[in-house]
Image (spheres, helix red, strand yellow):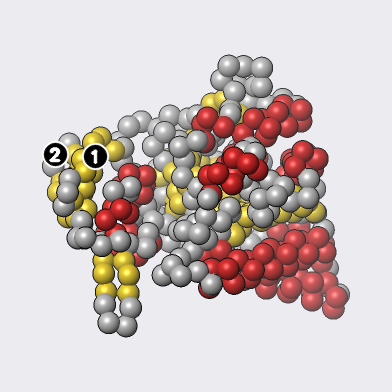
Amino acid sequence: MIQEFIINNGLYKETSDIFLSAVFTILERENEISITAYKMGNFLDSKVEGLDTELSGLLSLDINNKKIFADRVEYVFEKNKREIEQYVFANSDSKENLTRDFFQNIPKDIIKLSNTQQFSLKQNTNIGLYGRTGTGKTVTLQWMLYSALAKGSGIKGSDSYIKICDGKGADLFALGGILKNILGENISVGQTPNSLAKLSREMVEIMDERYELISKSQALNADGYDLNMIPSFLFVDELASIKDSCGSSKEGKALWNEILQNLGLIARKGRQACCHWVCSTQDPNSENLPVELRTQISAVLYGGSPSSERLRMAFSMCDLENVPRGLGERGEALFYADGLSMNEPELTKIPFVNLQTKQEFGKVVLNIIPSIKELRAEYE
């Protein structure tokens, strides 16, 4: 577990003649777990002092205490997990409005889900949002959009983009239209095979440009987050509808193959360039989501009570021997993500923002997006 943590968080340096790595020890007591990170007089010393969020995510435990000494940093975590509490925000006229304050202390690569759960975009380039009608998939999509916007994604002048394609021209398409009206040119919205081919092609170009910038960096094993890049997102809802619209003609098949090729490149290479693909579908079977793409998805949120067959398709990375069953509460979903040492999916509760109108959605967006001046200050 610690070895994977060191690799995923870049806590090592390797050259032709030397290998340096952070060193940890773990002590488990009845009610707590203590992790000690040792200082050794090198560039890693400053890094091991700021691993609160990452270690909490690794253990899925709350940090209870942290002490910094000259030779080590001791992190102590509560062993008994707190009960999951859903974040609920009322409409825009309420004092419980969703604002930038909620996102202020969340690291740029982290997606917060509940009071005890979160996952890292550094370790999960591709995110699958699954669930049939009425299981909260739209609520989950909205939360992913809010989380992306709060990081500065899609803000004009930020060199970051949000691209949206809704194969059915439904909820996500409507939300994308509102975002484009508010934010302008860094938001792109479509619903046809040609539009997805264009959007995915543009995403690959963004990714390649970022790879070139990263290659010029002097930092070893750096990714876009290390270089303070703002993440970009491609949201695709109901890919199967796009495939159906391509048809069986020669031109349609060529268009579908281009889409698959572009999505495959983003899925495989997007992580280092902070380019993320969010795939939403009612059913993650091979007809709706090609296997070669589904296997690249490492963070999954599945609403409702999926059958054992659908569980195997969505959570092929898990043991699936003790899958928890929910109570059917609002926002409830099965959750899994790489980098959290999970063997099974666990229950979570997606944050819920109570909205009734498009105007209220727009107000929330304006309440959470940072200004370009604020973005520059955060990322410099």
Can residue 299 be seen in the rendering of this structure? no
Q: Amino acid at mark 2?
A: Glu
Classify 332 as above or below 379.
above
1 or 2: mark nearer the eye:
1
Verify CB contact (< 8 Å) between mark 1 and mark 2. Answer: no
Q: CA distance from mark 1 to mark 2?
A: 18 Å
Classify 172 as above or below 84.
below
> In the rendered image, which residue does mark 1 sit on?
66
Identify the residue shown where x is 32% and y is 83%: 16
Q: Amino acid at mark 1?
A: Lys
> In the rendered image, which residue does mark 2 sit on?
30
Provide the secondary structure element on which disc 2 rests: loop
Q: Could you tell me which quadrant the N terminus lies in?
A: bottom left
Identify the residue shown where x is 68% and y is 32%: 366
Q: Name the spot of residue 27 as percent of width and height, x first.
A: 14, 49
Q: Name the spot of residue 359 as percent of width and height, x first.
A: 76, 28
Residue placed furthest toward the bottom: 16
Q: Name the spot of residue 117 as percent of width and height, x first.
A: 41, 41
Left or right of 328? Residue 210 is: right
Which is nearer the eye, 120 or 274?
274
Q: Residues within 10 Å of mark 2 (few under 14, many from 20)?
A: few
Left or right of 287? Residue 306 is: left
Q: Residues within 10 Å of mark 1 (few under 14, many from 20)?
A: some
Left or right of 181? Residue 303 is: left
Residue 215 shows which numbered tag? none
Classify 227 as above or below 74.
below
Which is nearer the eye, 291 or 273?
273
Provide the secondary structure element on which disc 1 rests: strand
Classify 109 as above or below 147.
below
Q: Name the spot of residue 281 as percent of width and height, x first.
A: 65, 52
Instruction: Work out whether mark 1 precedes mark 2 in sequence or the reverse, and give the earlier one.
Output: 2
